[in-house]
């Protein structure tokens, strides 16, 4: 399994920028710092009063590490290790930080995978949807957040999509506490679940606007037929102990797999 997560996916492949990884450190936290020197979160840009044109803001729809670095170098051709000023960084959100960090980890030899789920450290007593990174340290998987530079995340700090779904479906947590500031409840839990399962299969795409299967009415309420099928997906993914079983789980639900042309909306 570590060999599987050491190899790039189509989304995490650095492509034409692969050779640049040879000059990068292998330390996960050093790579996390490099990512923060290349990207600026859209909320941070707003708080800092950065006035950016629409073409800069459209970078938030970017999918793929190669395309992220295309945007980065279009703004500043300096080396990856050069920390750009905030106004010179690509505008993204948590997905872009996690995907690029994962890509750099894989390119420098560390098994890594992105996880889609919910963080507890943005708002008290609420779980905010978020993307982080897991990397293999030789003994187990370690959770780290390259967006804010925390390398010591625990299960109290972050719940991946599988865990959050099972917590809420089992009645251990209220769905209304899971969301993103605008949307809360079951739609957020469903979307994060399918994103997390896709990411475990190295298909790393943010958002689920493309997924007609999840477009039920009302979005934030239980839906017996849909939620029962997602229970099966979650159960298979949570108990998968090999690459083969992870892939088999993903293949069971082709209508929950992001299309090739999906963007990070």
Image (tube, grey):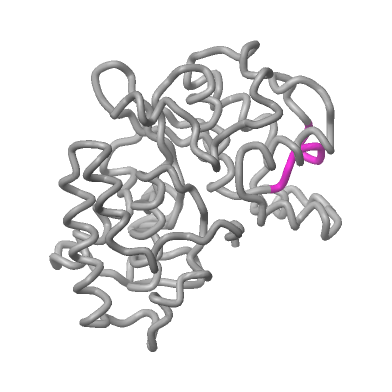
Which residue is at 17% across, 56% downward? 235
The magenta-colored residue range is 85-91
Which residue is at 41% across, 28% downward? 151
Which residue is at 42% across, 25% downward? 6
89 on left or right of 190: right
Which residue is at 24% across, 18% downward? 139
Q: Nearer the viewer, residue 201 or 102?
A: 201
- On the image, the x and y values in percent for residue 84 come to 77, 29
166 on left or right of 121: left
Displayed quadrant of residue 72: top right
Displayed quadrant of residue 257: bottom left
Quarter the C terminus occupies: bottom right
> As displayed, is residue 161 above or below residue 244?
below
Queried whether the magenta region covers residue 4, the answer comes back as no
From this viewpoint, is residue 120 visible?
yes
Queried whether the magenta region covers residue 86, the answer comes back as yes
> As displayed, is residue 224 above or below residue 27?
below
Quarter the N terminus occupies: top left
> As displayed, is residue 184 above or below residue 54?
below
- On the image, the x and y values in percent for residue 121 come to 40, 47
- On the image, the x and y values in percent for residue 143 come to 36, 33
- On the image, the x and y values in percent for residue 147 come to 54, 38
Q: Nearer the viewer, residue 231 or 93?
A: 231
């Amino acid at each position: 399994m570590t060999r599987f997560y050491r190899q790039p996916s189509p989304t995490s492949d650095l492509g034409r920028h692969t050779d640049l990884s040879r000059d990068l450190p292998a330390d996960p936290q050093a790579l996390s710092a490099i990512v923060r020197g290349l990207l600026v979160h859209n909320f941070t840009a707003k708080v800092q009063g950065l006035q950016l044109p629409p073409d800069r803001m459209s970078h938030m729809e970017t999918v793929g590490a190669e395309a992220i670095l295309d945007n980065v170098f279009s703004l500043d051709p300096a080396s990856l290790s050069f920390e750009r000023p905030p106004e010179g960084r690509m505008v993204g959100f948590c997905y872009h930080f996690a995907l690029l960090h994962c890509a750099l980890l894989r390119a420098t030899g560390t098994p890594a995978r992105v996880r889609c789920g919910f963080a507890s450290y943005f708002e008290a007593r609420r779980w905010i949807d978020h993307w982080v990174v897991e990397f293999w340290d030789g003994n187990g998987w370690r959770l780290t957040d390259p967006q804010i530079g925390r390398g010591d995340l625990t299960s109290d700090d972050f719940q991946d999509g599988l865990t959050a779904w099972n917590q809420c479906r089992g009645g251990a947590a209220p769905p209304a506490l899971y969301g993103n500031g605008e949307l809360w409840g079951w739609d957020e839990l469903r979307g994060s679940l399918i994103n997390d399962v896709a990411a475990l299969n190295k298909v790393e795409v943010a958002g689920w606007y493309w997924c007609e299967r999840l477009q039920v009415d009302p979005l934030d309420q239980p839906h017996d037929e849909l939620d029962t099928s997602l229970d099966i997906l979650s159960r298979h993914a949570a108990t998968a102990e090999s690459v083969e079983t992870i892939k088999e789980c993903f293949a069971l639900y082709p209508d929950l797999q992001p299309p090739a042309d999906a963007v990070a909306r």
